[in-house]
Image: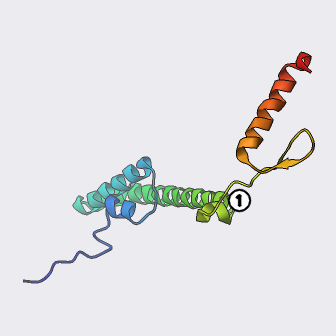
Amino acid sequence: MQNWEPNLHSSWNIRTIWETGTVLKVDTLDKIQERRNKKAAISTRRKRAQKVEAKAGYTELNRSVKRITRTDKCKNVKDLTMTAEKFAREGRKSFSGNYRKPERSVKGKEGKVTINIEEQRNRCVENFKELLNPSAQ
């Protein structure tokens, strides 16, 4: 018995399009299914006039499906580029995980720079107390 492998072109369905990474809207996927149904309807017609009529409807739908999928793919690419630009703007340090907040220097009343974080917090508390209670000076 032979190993059965489907032909790529004939086995393409909505699921394989979704798995390839192209993000299509649900409306677009519905239109693709409708196009498939119309194509199947062409082959089931027996009279030539009915086939021509069905084919005209199929070609119109085929054009609209191609247009819609193109816009969906372009929109997806634009979204991906926007996220890439956003990460580029944030900088390589934050993207790679080596990002640290820079240490801020806080000066005391005498103008001396304090390095200790606890002293910096105490100085900020003193500063806000002075600002909020001007009569205490």
Image location (x, y in percent) of residue 127: 84, 31
Image location (x, y in percent) of residue 47: 25, 60
Image location (x, y in percent) of residue 115: 78, 51
For label 1, the SS is: helix
Image location (x, y in percent) of residue 128: 81, 28
- Given the current orientation, which residue lies at the most extreme top position? 135
* For residue 53, side relative to residue 86 (left or right): left
Asked if residue 50 can be seen in this view, the reply is no
Q: Residue at x 37, y 63 (%)?
A: 19
Q: Foreground: 72 or 42?
A: 72
* For residue 40, side relative to residue 76 (left or right): left
Quarter in which the N terminus is drawn: bottom left
> Label 1: how many residues lie within 10 Å, few (<14), some (14-19) or many (20+)?
few
Q: Foreground: 5 or 10?
A: 5
Residue corresponding to mark 1 = 89
Count of marks overlaid on the render: 1
Asked which quadrant contains residue 43, the reply is bottom left
The three-letter code of the residue at mark 1 reads Arg
Asked which quadrant contains residue 17, the reply is bottom left
Q: Residue at x 81, y 25 (%)?
A: 129
